[in-house]
Image (cartoon, helix red, strand yellow):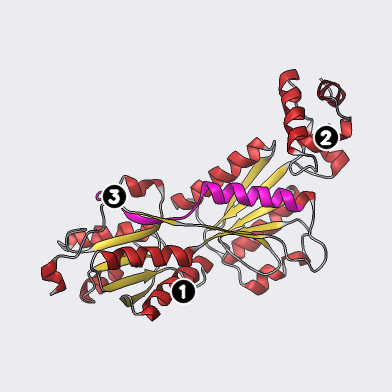
């Protein structure tokens, strides 16, 4: 089967077939669906190598994440790959181990091999991100990071933190500890901004415990002891992995969750619903965000922004998932 066979079967020109089967090709949704249905019916498979010679496209996308051991980023990769597969694209994945140098190396290595890159939660500074155009003209979409000059998909983390603290307030908690994430992380700064806004409103008193690495044991043991010494009756953690570390330490110290200490995480990774107790957490859109980032990247590839035009930036909502790690403050504790 050739592209001309598909064109004849769908009643359009070969060039329209090419656009319809290309990610982000400029055709109407109705035409795209008719062409793809004809291609499926005929068993047509595009020759990516031949297409690349004609269009200059590789048919590949890159996704760069800081830590594949963290289930949050594994979910992001699965979401990117699923969406790309549906568009007939393959995905190259790079894990930078939260190292800015490795992040730059990954971009330099991937850029010549792909049509564009989804850069997830980068730790590069704004200045370093702004200089990426010096060595690649491939479009880069930021996922869970917002920076001028880049298309981006982010979650409303300020809203998420507000929802979490409002929930704890409704349960009677007035003194709440916050265990923050890495200072170089945009997400950590956004979450901290949400916490500070609630504290400034006077709704609750916030005990700032400091910043920890987003790992189960990355300073969490010490953070848990600080939380217990602070007199807080609840704690909000930077992410679910940190929350699991806190709960583990509380258990060792004989502090029951949620009876004596309520715990809230952030991200809503799959393990959060399987933990004991199941973790109350701010759900951040992972699969949805990954799909949106791929769609935005394909949109930019199909219609590059004009000079001086700001690429699109999407903000997705979060929501609080209430499970078994939070409970109403006992009246004796309130007294």
238 sits left or right of 289 in the view:
left
Quarter of the C terminus within the rendering: bottom left
Within 10 angstroms of label 2, few (less than 14), some, or many (20 or more) residues?
many
Q: Quadrant of the N terminus?
A: top right
* Mark number displayed over residue 18: 2
Q: Is residue 31 magenta?
A: no
Mark 3 and mark 2 in contact? Answer it, CB < 8 Å: no
* Residue farthest along the left direction in this orientation: 332
| Residue at position x 35%, y 50% in the image | 272
Residue under pointer 1? 193
What residue is rendered at 78% in x and 42% in y? 25
x and y, in percent, of residue 185 in the image: 51, 68
Dot 3 falls on a residue whose secondary structure is loop
Whole-angstrom CA distance, mark 1 to mark 3, is: 26 Å
Residue range (magenta): 275-300
User: Which numbered circle lies on residue 278?
Assistant: 3
Mark 1 Cα-neighbour bin, 10 Å: few <14, some 14–19, many ≥20: some
Q: Residue at x 21, y 75 (%)?
A: 231
Query: Residue 69's mark?
Result: none
**Residue 178 x, y percent position in the rendering:** 34, 71
> Where 188 falls versus 267 (above or below)?
below
User: Residue 64, image x and y in percent?
Assistant: 60, 54
Q: Nearer the N terminus, badge 1 or badge 2?
A: 2
Whole-percent x and y of residue 262?
25, 62
Residues tagged 1 and 2 counted as in contact (Cβ below 8 A): no
Q: Which image quarter: residue 180?
A: bottom left
Choose between 59 and 207: the one closer to the eye.
207
How far separated are the C-alphas under marks 1 and 2?
A: 47 Å
Which element type, helix, strand or loop, lies under badge 1?
A: helix
Chain-order first, disc 1 or disc 3: 1
Is residue 312 placed above or below 9 in the rendered structure? below
99 or 171, nearer to the observer: 171
């Amino acid at each position: 089967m050739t592209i001309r066979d598909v064109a004849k079967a769908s009643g359009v020109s070969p060039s329209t077939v090419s656009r319809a089967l290309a990610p982000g090709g400029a055709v109407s949704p109705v035409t795209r669906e008719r062409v793809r249905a004809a291609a499926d019916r005929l068993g047509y498979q595009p020759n990516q190598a031949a297409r690349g010679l004609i269009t200059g496209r590789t048919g590949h996308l890159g996704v760069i994440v800081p830590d594949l051991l963290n289930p949050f980023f594994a979910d992001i990769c699965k979401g990117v790959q699923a969406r790309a597969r549906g568009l007939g694209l393959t995905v190259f994945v790079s894990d930078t181990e939260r190292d800015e140098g490795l992040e730059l190396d990954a971009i330099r290595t991937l850029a010549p091999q792909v049509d564009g890159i989804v850069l997830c939660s980068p730790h590069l500074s704004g200045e370093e991100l702004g200089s990426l155009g010096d060595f690649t003209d491939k479009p880069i979409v930021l996922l869970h990071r917002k920076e001028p000059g880049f298309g981006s998909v982010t979650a409303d983390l300020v809203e998420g933190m507000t929802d979490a603290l409002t929930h704890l307030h409704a349960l009677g908690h007035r003194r709440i500890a916050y265990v923050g994430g890495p200072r170089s992380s945009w997400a950590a700064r956004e979450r901290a901004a949400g916490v500070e806004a609630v504290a400034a409103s006077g709704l609750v008193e916030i005990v700032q415990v400091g910043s920890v690495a987003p790992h189960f044991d990355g300073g969490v043991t010490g953070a848990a002891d600080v939380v217990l010494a602070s007199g807080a009756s609840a704690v909000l953690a930077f992410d679910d992995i940190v929350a699991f570390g806190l709960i583990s330490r509380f258990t060792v110290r004989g502090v029951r969750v949620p009876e004596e200490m309520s715990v809230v995480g952030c991200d809503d990774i799959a393990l959060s619903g399987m933990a004991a107790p199941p973790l109350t957490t701010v759900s951040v859109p992972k699969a949805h965000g990954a799909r949106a980032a791929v769609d935005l990247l394909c949109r930019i590839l199909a219609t590059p922004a004009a000079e001086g035009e700001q690429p699109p930036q999407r903000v997705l909502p979060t929501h609080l998932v209430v499970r078994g790690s939070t409970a109403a403050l006992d009246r004796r504790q309130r007294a």
